[in-house]
Image (cartoon, rainbow, N blue to C red):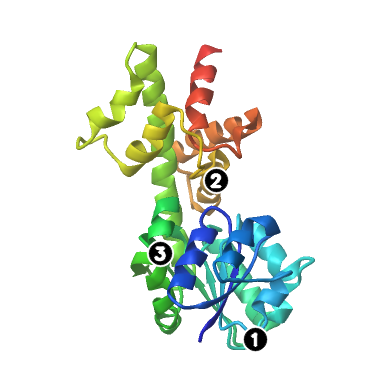
Amino acid sequence: MTKVAFLGTGLMGAPMVLRLLAAGFEVHVWNRSPEKALQLGNAGATLAASPSIAISGADIVCLCLTDGHAVEDLFFGAAAAAAALDADTLIVDFSTIGPVSTRSLAARVSQRVTGVRWVDAPVTGGVKGAENGELVILAGGEPSDVETVHPLLSCLGKRVCHLGPLGAGQAAKLCNQLIVAINVVAIAEALALARANGLDISALPDALAGGWADSLPLQIIGQRMASGIYEPPIVAVGTFGKDLALVLGTATGEPPALAGKAAAIYRAAAAAGIGMADATALLGFIEQAGER
């Protein structure tokens, strides 16, 4: 049986682990906040007290962490988990950390432990996609490595798209986040405009369904904004801000203009204290900003 270490069991990681357990994988999990992993232990996962314990002897190491700093700290910080990797370990990183960090961290890990391979595999599809095994997985890496982990990836997603060498999956994910993050700002502004003009905003997503303004973010995040639904959270305001910062840091030449404007809105929202809140909170922030 393939031994899988899964590090990071938050909103996305936890349902992904449940999918792997259901498919028969032996999964050892670690999370920075241990209480968030308890349900996975009840479902059959082995709970590890440290990243190194989870990684030890694993064939595949899956990462689903907050950002590049978290990945770097895991391997080279106090946890020093790089030392626990075996020479033939294959790392699959579901985190969104950008292509530059991916290539840099993969090189550092391979220098520490010769033979370790790395596939970047950020996902899109949200929590529901993770729960239902319907994620779209944007993969970068050597073709043979992507093929090796394809059985694992196919348990998690409806499509596995191999887009090129290491970092290609991260670049594609940033393109995705650029589109979605700007769309979410536009949705919040549209709902604010609708309410200011006396519309019942709960009717707007349905009214626009099927037209050119329609999108999954409108029907999922827009519906939640219009109805004031914050729980269960599906994506934090700060996640979009973090990803747009990666977009701006990755761009060559003149930075994307709309990305810069949207990033400024997300930074201001985080400064106002809603960075950890569900994206639903962005509507109230936009409306309050318009009143000032």
Above or below, 18 relative to 248: below
Three-letter amino acid code at the position of disc 2: Thr
What residue lies at 41% left-to-right and 28% top-to-bottom?
227
Location of mark 2 (residue): 239
Nearer to us in this view, 218 or 27: 27
Q: Is mark 3 on a helix, strand or loop?
A: strand
Where's the C terminus, which quadrant? top right
Mark nearest the camera among 3 and 1 is 1
The residue sitting at the left extreme is 210
Q: Residue 180's spot in the image, x, y percent?
A: 40, 44
Q: Which mark is residue 153?
A: none
Above or below, 75 relative to 211: below
From the viewer's perspective, tell me whether residue 211 is left or right of residue 25: left
Location of mark 3 (residue): 138
How dense is the environment of label 2, judged by Cα within 10 Å: few (below 14), some, or many (20 and up)? many
What residue lies at 26% left-to-right and 31% top-to-bottom?
206
Badge 1 or badge 2: first in the primary sequence: 1
Q: Residue 264's spot in the image, x, y percent?
A: 55, 33
Q: What element carries label 1?
A: loop
How dense is the environment of label 1, judged by Cα within 10 Å: few (below 14), some, or many (20 and up)? some
Q: What element carries label 2?
A: helix
From the viewer's perspective, tell me whether residue 222 is left or right of residue 290: left
Nearer to us in this view, 48 or 77: 48
Three-letter amino acid code at the position of disc 3: Leu
The residue sitting at the right extreme is 78
What residue lies at 54% left-to-right and 51% top-to-bottom?
246
Three-letter amino acid code at the position of disc 1: Asp
How dense is the environment of label 3, judged by Cα within 10 Å: few (below 14), some, or many (20 and up)? many
Badge 3 or badge 1: first in the primary sequence: 1
Location of mark 1 (residue): 86
